[in-house]
Amino acid sequence: MGQKFWQIWVVAGILGAIAITFILLAIMGLDGAKPATSPDPEPVAGEEAEEAPPEEIYDPLLDGTWSYSPGPEGPVNWGKIRSEFELCQTGTSQSPIDIRAFELVMERPLVSIGYGDAQLMVRVGSDRFSAVVENEHTFMLDGNTFRLDRIVIHSPAEHRLDGKQMPMEVQLQHQGAGGTLVLSLLLNAGPENPSLQPLIEAVGGYPDTPIVSASTNLATLLPGNLSYYLYKGSLTHPPCYENVSWLVFKEVGTVSRAQLASFQSVVKNNVRPIQSKSRDVEFYRLD
């Protein structure tokens, strides 16, 4: 009996010691599971939290994987360079075209021009000219409003009228709920074009200054007679997206030989060849 009592007393003592150990650990906060962490630093008064840099938007006109020159990077191979450029090879409504036959449409769609002094960020390359429009200018067609996004200049022209190729073409690319709308202004050699001069001067700094600011009055850049050809086509550069509305003005503007020489001394032959001619073209006479 005494021996059994002694055994019970020993077990009770051991259990008590274990219980006391757990109590002490709980009091000291040493639970053995969570590592010690330092508190987050308090923000300093007057300091703003750093913002993540904005995600860069892909601009195909700045993509150096394609070019206008013959060879593996040239127009006939655009569709093979990247999967995003596939339509350049497989598309069925590609641009530019030679406008020869058209359907005369007598009804006049609603046209409203909201152009003025444009602030531009011009990017120049040996075969690229792209001027991003930094303030708002709009063009309304058939009740759809399109916002001017950029101005692209090609020399010689990409579109042709009855087989004739002009020495320059100014393309004004718009975006809106109705998709992409591009206004095309063909220019022939003649008197100096004052509205074009700020853009020509922007080319002169290349290659030392490939990005420059410029401004011009877009309203005076357009022809006096707004009669135009309208057809469905594509972008004339990769990724060659289709379902683009092309509005090509019938009236041809002018560019001086000096202006042409200045532009072509830097931007050389940035032209996509003529695509399929089997296209429905409408003509709207607005005179």
Image (cartoon, rainbow, N blue to C red):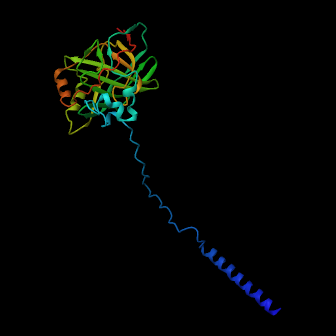
Q: Residue at 32% of width from left, 30% of height from top?
A: 77
Q: Quadrant of residue 12?
A: bottom right
Inspect this view and state whether residue 231 appears.
yes
Residue placed farthest to the right in the image?
1
| In this view, 95 is above or below 212 | above
Out of 50 and 75, give the one closest to the viewer.
Answer: 75
- In the displayed orientation, state which residue is furthest to the bottom: 2
User: Considering the image in quadrants, where does the C terminus appear?
Assistant: top left
Q: What residue is shown at x 74% (from left), y 84% (from top)?
A: 11
Q: Position of residue 24 (x, y in %)?
A: 64, 78
Q: Is residue 189 left or right of residue 53?
A: left
Dividing the picture into quarters, in which one does residue 204 lie?
A: top left
Q: Tell me residue 98's x, y (percent).
A: 31, 16
What residue appears at the point 29 percent right and 23 percent down from the top-left corner?
A: 273
As drawn, is 69 to the left or to the right of 285? left
> In the picture shown, does residue 111 fall above or below 125?
above
